[in-house]
Image (cartoon, rainbow, N blue to C red):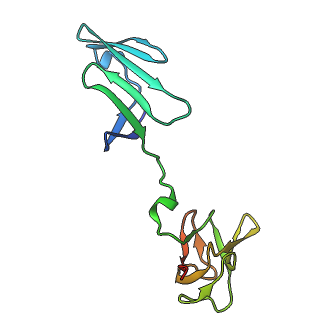
Amino acid sequence: RSRPQTRRYTVAGTEHEVRYHPVDPEEHPGVRVLSAERHRVTLEVDGVRRLFHVKHNSNKPEVYVDSPFTGAHTLTPVPRFADPQDRTEPGSLLAPMPGTVVRVAEGLAPGDTVTAGQPLLWLEAMKMEHRIVSPASGTLTALHAALGHQVEFGALLAVVQEETPA
């Protein structure tokens, strides 16, 4: 028997975990799948037919389910892996891929003034060097990367606080 698969959805602002795995019909004698079509699933539960309407628009991640038990709901999938940008403050520089910090701009330290596009550090990944540049002119408020550090995708390397126009 395979291990259960897990998916997370939000319904009306509440997150729910759905666990599923293929089942042997003999394990659930009171439940039968009568039909499973693209937009409709019909189950028989203890001799009573239950019809579930399902709609999925290929342009959107949501799934719409109309259940005889709970009514109509919109299920929004929760990404399995969070986007690192969603967890960071403005001006954060994240590693675009796993790699090694092979160079840091000479004398670079928190508190320094930087300009938009100024190279701050270099990562080596797959035998190629990638420049990490300041996204805006402002002040370097944090520098987490150091020469020789191994970094993972999405690791916070530095933070630049954008200067505000006077």
Q: Is residue 4 visible?
A: no
Question: For this view, does 20 lie left or right of residue 70?
Answer: right
Residue appearing at x 46%, y 18% in the figure: 39
Residue appearing at x 39%, y 18% in the figure: 53
Question: For this view, does 28 lie left or right of residue 90?
Answer: left
Residue appearing at x 38%, y 40% in the figure: 9
Q: x and y percent of residue 68 in the render?
A: 27, 18
Q: Quadrant of residue 97?
A: bottom right
Near-viewer residue (59 or 3)? 59
- Position of the N terminus by quadrant: top left
Near-viewer residue (90 or 120)? 90
> Looking at the picture, does residue 78 appear above or below residue 57?
below
Q: Count the labels in the image.
A: 0
> Looking at the picture, does residue 114 appear above or below residue 69?
below
Q: Residue lying furthest front in this view?
A: 166
Q: Is residue 106 visible?
A: yes
Q: Quadrant of residue 127?
A: bottom right
Q: Residue lying furthest bottom in this view?
A: 107
Q: Residue lying furthest right in this view?
A: 128
Q: Quadrant of residue 157?
A: bottom right
Q: Residue lying furthest top in this view?
A: 47
Q: x and y percent of residue 166 in the render?
A: 53, 83
> Looking at the picture, does residue 35 appear above or below residue 88?
above
Residue appearing at x 49%, y 37% in the figure: 61
Q: x and y percent of residue 164 in the render?
A: 53, 79
Q: x and y percent of residue 46 in the render?
A: 23, 11
